[in-house]
Amino acid sequence: MRLGRVKAIVVRDVKLVARSRMQLFWILVFPLILLSGYVALFAPGGGQGAVEVRVAVVPGAPSAQGVAARVAGYLEGMRWNEGFEVGVNATVYGDLGEALSRLRRGYLDAVVVVYPGSVNATVYLLRGTSNPVREELAAALLRSFFAYSAHFSALELLSGYVNSSVEECPRLAGGAGRVLGEAWRIASGRGVRFVGVTAGGGEARPRVVGWMTLSVVFMNFMFGGILGGANMITSEVRRGFAERLLSTALRPSEYYAGITLSWLLVLSASSLPVAALGFGVYGGALAVEPLSPGAVYVAAVILLAELLAFSLGVLIGLLARTPEAAAIAANVVIWATMIGGGFWMPKSMLPGFLRVFADYNVLSVLFYAAVDVAVYGRSVASSLAPALAAAAITAALFAAAAAAYTRYLPRLLEEASG
C-alpha cells in the first residue's frame, strides 16, 4: 500500500466535506443544537426545584366539610424529610364529579374523599400518563400520609384508654407515661433520617450533562458514520468519482484505506465542539485526567465507535447499491439503535425487552463503556470485558466491509456504467 496515495484520498475527502455547507451543518452545528436542547429540557442550570403533587380533597358527606379542610391543611403543612423535594398543593373541592373530571384531564394527581370519624377516606389516583414515576410518587406520598394518620389516630385512642385506666389505678401513672411517650416518639419517625447520595459522589446535574454530551457524540457518529458512509459509497459510484479514481493506478485497497481515515478524522473533529460545549460550557462531569489511562481508554473506545459506525455504513451502502435505498436502510439502523440502545434515555429506564437490546448492541456497549469511565469515574476494569468483545466485533465488521468493498466495487462500477 502506497501511503502517498492514501494521503491524497484523505486530503481530497476532507476538502470535500469542508466545502459542503450542508455537511458542515449536520456534523458540526446540528449536534450543538441537539445538545443544547437536551440540556435545556432535562438538565437546566437552575435546577427543576421541588415536585408539586396536586391533590383535591372532597368531603364525602356534608358533615365532613371540616374534616376536608383539616386534611388539606395537614397535607400542605406536613414537613417532609430533608431527603425529599416534594410539595403538596391541596385544594378543597365541593363536587366530586368536578374533581374527578380534572383528575382525568391531568390537572390533578389525586382526589381524596374524606368521611367523618377516624381515618376513613377513598383515594383516586391518576394513572396511564407518560410519567409513571410521578404517578408512583403521588401514590407513595398519600399512602405515607394516611399511614401516619392511622398511627396517630390509633395512638390517640390508646392514649385515651390508658389515661382513663390510670385515673382508676394511680399506681400505673409513672410507667404508663413513659410507655406512651416512647410510643409517640417512635410513631413520629423522628429516629429515622433520609440522606440522598448521588451515584459516584458529587452533584447529579454534572453527571447528567456528561451523559448527554457523550450521547450526542455517539449519535453524531451514527449519522455521520452509518448514514454518511452509506451515502458516500453509493453516491461516488453513481457519480463516477470512484470509477475515475480507480481508472488510474490507484488500488481499491488504497482507496478504501483513504476514505476510512478521512471519515475517522472528520468524525473525531466533529466530536470536539460537542465535547467542548457539554463539558466546558454546560458543566458536564469529566472524571478522567488528560493522558491518564482512563482518558486513553475512553479515546480508544470512541475510535472503535467511529470505526464501527463507518463499517456499518460501508456494508449498508454496498448492499443497498443506490443512495435512496442506502438512506432508508441506514436510518432504520440509526433510529432503532438510538431509541432502543439507551441513547435517548439511560438504558436503566428502558422496558425489559429494549434493555436486552441495549445490553448487547455493540454501539451501546461502547457508549456505556465510555460513560462509565469518563463521566462516572469507574475503573477501566469494570467495563473492559464487554469493551474487548465489542472491539473484536468491530474488527470483524471492518474486515468484512474492507473485503466486500474491494471485491464488489468493480461489480458496482460495471452496473453503474451499464
Image (cartoon, rainbow, N blue to C red):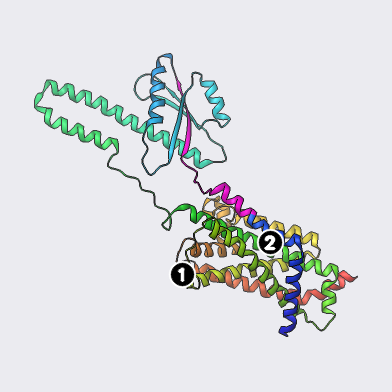
- Sequence-wise, the earlier of marks 2 and 1 is 2
* Viewer-side residue, 202 vs 387: 202
**Which element type, helix, strand or loop, lies under badge 2?**
helix
Whether residue 403 is visible, yes or no, is no
Q: Quadrant of residue 324?
A: bottom right
Q: Is residue 53 above or below residue 266?
A: above
**Rendered image: mark on residue 27:** 2
Furthest-left residue in this view? 171
- Secondary structure at badge 1 equals helix
Identify the residue under disc 1: 381
The 10 Å Cα crowd at callout 2, few under 14, some 14 to 19, many 20 or more, is many
Magenta segment: 33-59
Camera-side residue of 389 and 197: 197
* Spatial CA span between label 2 and label 1: 32 Å
Measuring from the top left, give residue 130's x and y in whole percent. 57, 40
Q: Residue at x 52, y 30 (%)?
A: 108
Asked if 393 appears above or below 171 in the picture, the reply is below
Residue drawn where x is 61% and y is 58% of the image: 216
Q: List the single residue furthest toward the bottom.
A: 2
Q: Pointer 1: residues within 10 angstroms few (<14), some, or many (20+)?
A: few
The quadrant in which the N terminus is found is bottom right
Of the residues shown, which amino acid type is indicated by label 2? Ile
